[in-house]
Image (cartoon, grey):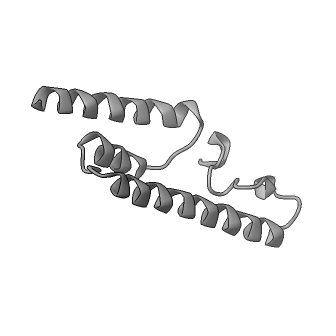
């Protein structure tokens, strides 16, 4: 069973690592979440529900903060796009 778990971790982290640049996003803690799932720490439906609830609430909070910030930024800035400061474009990261 150990070999399967190692293979699951390798596949999961590879997908996470390759998926972030492919979607032009960056979230280093995403690898930790991937490990939590791939290593099998979520053993009950309640564990999964708690994790998914945390992800959804965090996403909603970041979107709400993005809207708040967008409303306060000078309108001539490129970062006025909703969430532009959360998921910056490649040219903005320099």
Res 85 → quadrant: bottom right
Q: Please tell me which residue lies in front, 93 or 53.
A: 53
Residue 49 location (% of width, % of height): 43, 56
Residue 22, by quadrant, is: top right
Residue 70, how many percent across, how many down? 78, 65
Q: Quadrant of the N terminus?
A: top left
**Residue at screen point 67% across, 68% down:** 65
Q: How many marks?
A: 0
Depth check, front residue: 44 or 1: 44
Q: Is residue 5 above or below residue 51?
A: above
Which residue does the image show at 59% across and 37% down from the upper left? 24
Q: Quick check: 6 left or right of 52? A: left
Residue, far front: 45
Q: Position of residue 15 (x, y in %)?
A: 41, 30
- Residue 36 is situated, as x and y percent measured from the top left of the image, at 30, 49
Q: Residue at x 45, y 30 (%)?
A: 18
Nearer to the camera, 63 or 57:
57
Q: Residue furthest left?
A: 2
Q: Is residue 54 left or right of residue 74?
A: left
């Amino acid at each position: 069973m150990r070999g399967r778990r190692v293979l699951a971790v390798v596949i999961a982290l590879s997908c996470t690592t390759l998926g972030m640049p492919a979607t032009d996003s960056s979230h280093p803690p995403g690898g930790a979440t991937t490990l939590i799932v791939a290593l099998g720490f979520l053993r009950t439906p309640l564990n999964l529900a708690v994790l998914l609830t945390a992800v959804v609430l965090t996403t909603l909070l970041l979107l709400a903060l993005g809207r708040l910030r967008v409303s306060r930024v000078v309108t001539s800035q490129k970062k006025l796009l909703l969430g532009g400061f959360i998921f910056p474009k490649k040219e903005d990261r320099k």
